[in-house]
């Protein structure tokens, strides 16, 4: 294992090799752990996460990233926290690899410390902790009361059961101070994953989508549906600057109004993707990490609106999302699936489940593209004539 760690830089650009080695290391850990150790880690997992959340509130990760090592007394003086509390927090944080101890009472930053100091990462941890834990506490009672069936509605799931509301999560969060700000900040960085390739880095965008643009069929080449601040459209346009046809990013008005930096060639269009698609006959419609947030009936509606806008045999729909393995799913991906369940009544999907969803509205899956490593894949979809 030390040899693997020492040579990690050799696999930074080989995501498949990195994922394989990571899986091997986890299998080794599993083979060495005693059953009681595994169970105790689960039982105490909430407390470990609490330590991270409090450390974030105290800005301990920022302080250690700016200067290391620091002493408990020094950090207590800066933060105003009792030294005894910091000592107990650091015992757990060191065990988790979030910080390292260099000497008695001295602590320094690790790579995870510096990751936790990133604004988008901090926002993601706050969002999933603050919004997730109240729901998780009530989720067993929800599933028991509902006969252990999956929720089918965005307004009648674990989220609503926990909060005593009939509002969907986004409507509810919009009334809570700071929640949507944390969510938006998180979505811009997704826990800060520079090693993971973006879909446009490995998917043949030019061959599959851009080269087939025909202005006589429609003026739009790339429609980024629910595209936030236009990050994906901008990546494609920067990689292929000579692309013909218009690019546009669509999202809710308050998101579009908040865009401060975007290539001037990309249009901005306020649009709710649960309503009919206003741009007809585009070459490519793109949905990045959208459908997993919605219960199946809403997912069907989103796809139906896009189907009605597509030209048979010409328009493409690309769905960028995690594609779950049919077996031995990495915990990162299965964890995201469960988060979609309790927050949105939604789900991540396997290839089989993606095909069922897409074909259920009369569209055709041309190919399911798997990424190198464990990032997002792409489901390539067409409307046949």
Image (spheres, rainbow, N blue to C red):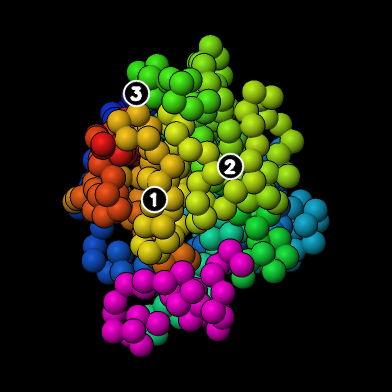
- Helix, strand or loop at mark 3: helix
Residue 231 is left or right of residue 255, and the answer is left
- Helix, strand or loop at mark 1: helix
Quarter that holds the C terminus: top left
Residue 205 is left or right of residue 257, and the answer is left
Looking at this view, is 85 or 227 the one in front? 227
Q: Give x and y (percent) for residue 74.
A: 76, 51
Q: Residue at x 61, y 67 (%)?
A: 171
Measured Cα–Cα span from mark 3 to mark 1? 20 Å
Residue at the far top in the pictured view: 242
Measured Cα–Cα span from mark 2 to mark 1? 15 Å
Residue receiving disc 1: 303
Looking at this view, is 327 or 267 the one in front? 267
Measured Cα–Cα span from mark 2 to mark 3? 22 Å
- Badge 2 or badge 3: first in the primary sequence: 3
Q: Is residue 261 above or below residue 295?
A: above
Structural crowding at the residue carrying mark 1, measured as other residues with C-alpha within 10 Å and reported as few (<14), some (14–19) or many (≥20): many
Quarter that holds the N terminus: top left
Q: Nearer the viewer, mark 3 or mark 1?
A: 1
Q: Give x and y (percent) for residue 377.
A: 34, 37
Residue receiving disc 2: 250
- Helix, strand or loop at mark 2: strand
Structural crowding at the residue carrying mark 3, measured as other residues with C-alpha within 10 Å and reported as few (<14), some (14–19) or many (≥20): few
Quarter residue 195 falls in? top left
Q: Is residue 319 above or below residue 57?
A: above
Asked if residue 168 is among those painted magenta in the image, a careful observer would answer yes
Residue range in magenta is 142-171
Q: Give x and y (percent) for residue 337.
A: 37, 57
Q: Residue at x 51, y 67 (%)?
A: 132
Looking at this view, is 120 or 263 the one in front? 263
Q: Residue at x 62, y 70 (%)?
A: 172
What is the number of the mark on residue 208? Answer: 3
């Amino acid at each position: 294992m030390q040899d693997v760690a020492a040579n990690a830089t050799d696999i930074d650009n080989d995501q498949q090799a990195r994922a394989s080695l990571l899986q091997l290391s986890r299998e080794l850990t599993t083979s060495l752990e005693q059953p009681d150790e595994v169970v105790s880690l689960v039982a105490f997992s909430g407390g470990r996460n609490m330590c991270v959340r409090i450390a974030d509130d105290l800005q301990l990760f920022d302080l250690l990233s700016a200067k290391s090592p620091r002493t408990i007394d020094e950090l207590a003086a800066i933060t105003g926290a009792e030294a005894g509390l910091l000592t107990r927090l650091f015992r757990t944080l060191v065990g988790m690899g979030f910080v390292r101890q260099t000497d008695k009472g001295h602590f320094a930053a690790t790579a995870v410390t510096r990751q936790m100091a990133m604004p988008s990462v901090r926002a993601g941890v706050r969002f999933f902790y603050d919004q997730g834990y109240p729901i998780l506490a009530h989720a067993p009672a929800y599933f028991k009361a509902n006969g252990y069936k999956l929720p089918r509605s965005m307004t009648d799931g674990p989220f609503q059961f926990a909060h005593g509301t009939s509002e969907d999560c986004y409507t509810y969060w919009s009334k809570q101070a700071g929640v949507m700000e944390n969510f938006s900040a998180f979505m811009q960085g997704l826990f800060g994953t520079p090693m993971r390739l973006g879909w446009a880095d490995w998917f043949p965008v030019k061959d599959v989508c851009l080269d087939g643009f025909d202005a006589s069929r429609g003026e739009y080449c790339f429609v980024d549906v629910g595209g936030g601040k236009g990050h994906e459209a901008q990546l494609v346009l920067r990689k292929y600057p000579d692309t013909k046809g218009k690019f546009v990013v669509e999202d809710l008005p308050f998101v579009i109004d908040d865009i401060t930096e975007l290539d001037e060639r990309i249009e901005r269009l306020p649009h709710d993707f649960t309503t009919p698609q206003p741009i007809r006959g585009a070459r490519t419609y793109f949905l990045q990490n959208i459908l997993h947030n919605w219960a199946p009936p809403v997912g069907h509606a989103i796809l139906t609106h896009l189907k009605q806008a597509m030209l048979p045999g010409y328009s493409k729909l690309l769905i960028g999302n995690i594609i779950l393995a049919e077996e031995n799913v990495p915990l990162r991906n299965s964890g995201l699936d469960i988060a979609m369940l309790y927050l949105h009544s939604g789900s991540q999907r396997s290839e089989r489940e993606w095909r069922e969803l897409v074909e259920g509205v009369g569209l055709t899956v041309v190919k399911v593209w798997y990424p190198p490593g464990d990032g997002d894949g792409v489901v390539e979809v067409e409307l046949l004539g």
